[in-house]
Image (tube, helix red, strand yellow):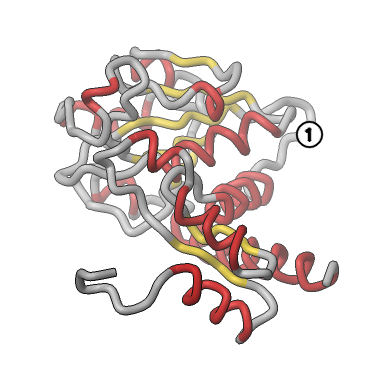
Amino acid sequence: MDGDKSEHLLEAIPVMGCYCDLIGVRSFAGLTDREYDYAETVLNQFIKYSGRPVFAMETATVHPLQAFADLITIKEHWPHADRKPKVVLTWAPHCRALPQAVPNSFAQWMNADKDIDLVITHPKGYELDPKFVAGAQVEYDQRKAFEGADFIYAKNWSNPGVTNPSDYGKITCDDRSWTVDSEHMSWTNDGKFMHCLPVRRNLIVTDDVIESPNSLVIPEAANREISCSVVIKRMLETL
């Protein structure tokens, strides 16, 4: 308190609680201290001190509203009742170190749906935390992972530090062969392309793929409104 902060969390958070019925928290990983980030310190402070129901708009380790929107999108664009869709979460390169929140939640939500077959592919050393991956198949060969896929979900994440804690939050791979292009999509079963947006074109995905008829990025983004509205409505109904 003798620095540049004039208000303590113990007052700031409960004051926010006085002004509303729900609180949506959007916080981000610092990517320097894995224990601090994965303890969800900021989110839990709001839960503890606000006196109000709290929902995550993205936190250090999870982005459930995005994963909910992703699931809605897959369900909307899967017309086959006789078989499960093969959904692939693929790492792709990026120029900045990004958190694992989106891939963590995507893996968690797809794993929870027994009508989806999830495969995760990434370079060795980029393993996501087991509590999110659960029993999902991990395939280090991207081409093998893509073969026969119905949906490709591309997302970058920095090193999660699972196999080597000192690598947490770092870019330890910059292999541009992981960028999703038309050749990659040719390995799929006429697969649909997904990404949470915003996206670095020609790093994560090439122009021709994201602009193709099989790209679902716009309806996927529109479903963010649906996922958030559903959660807020259900929470308000319980007050």
> Where residue 41 sits in the image (x, y, percent)?
46, 49
| Residue 123 seen by the camera | no
* Label tally: 1
Position of the N terminus by quadrant: bottom left
At a point 37% along the width and 50% down the height, the residue shown is: 212
The relative height of residue 184 versus residue 200 in the rendered view (above or below) is above
Residue 214 placement (x, y as % from top left): 46, 47
Compared across the picture, whether 73 is left or right of 81 comes to: left
- Residue at the bottom extreme of this rendering: 19
Q: Which residue is drawn at the image coordinates 44% and 38% (left, top)? A: 38
Q: Position of residue 183 (x, y in %)?
A: 28, 29
Quarter where residue 47 is shown: bottom right
For this orientation, the residue located farthest to the front is 2
User: Which one is nearer the viewer's eye here, 103 or 178?
Assistant: 103
Question: Does dot 1 land on a helix, a strand or a loop?
Answer: loop
Vertical arrangement, residue 142 with respect to residue 9, above or below: above
Q: Quadrant of residue 53?
A: bottom right
Q: Mark 1 = which residue? A: 81
**In the depicted view, which residue is nearer to us: 154 or 57?**
57
Side of 160 relative to 21 (left or right): left
Q: In this view, does 129 lie to the left or right of 225?
A: left
Amino acid beneath label 1: Ala
Residue 167 visible within the image: yes
Instruction: Name the residue located 19 percent from the left edge and 26 percent from the top edge.
Output: 177
Instruction: Please tell me how crowded label 1 is: few (under 14), some (14-19), or many (20+) other residues with Cα within 10 Å.
Output: few
Q: Quadrant of the C terminus?
A: bottom right
Q: Where is residue 210 in the image (x, y as percent from the top left)?
A: 34, 51
The one of 41 and 176 positioned closer to us in this rendering: 41
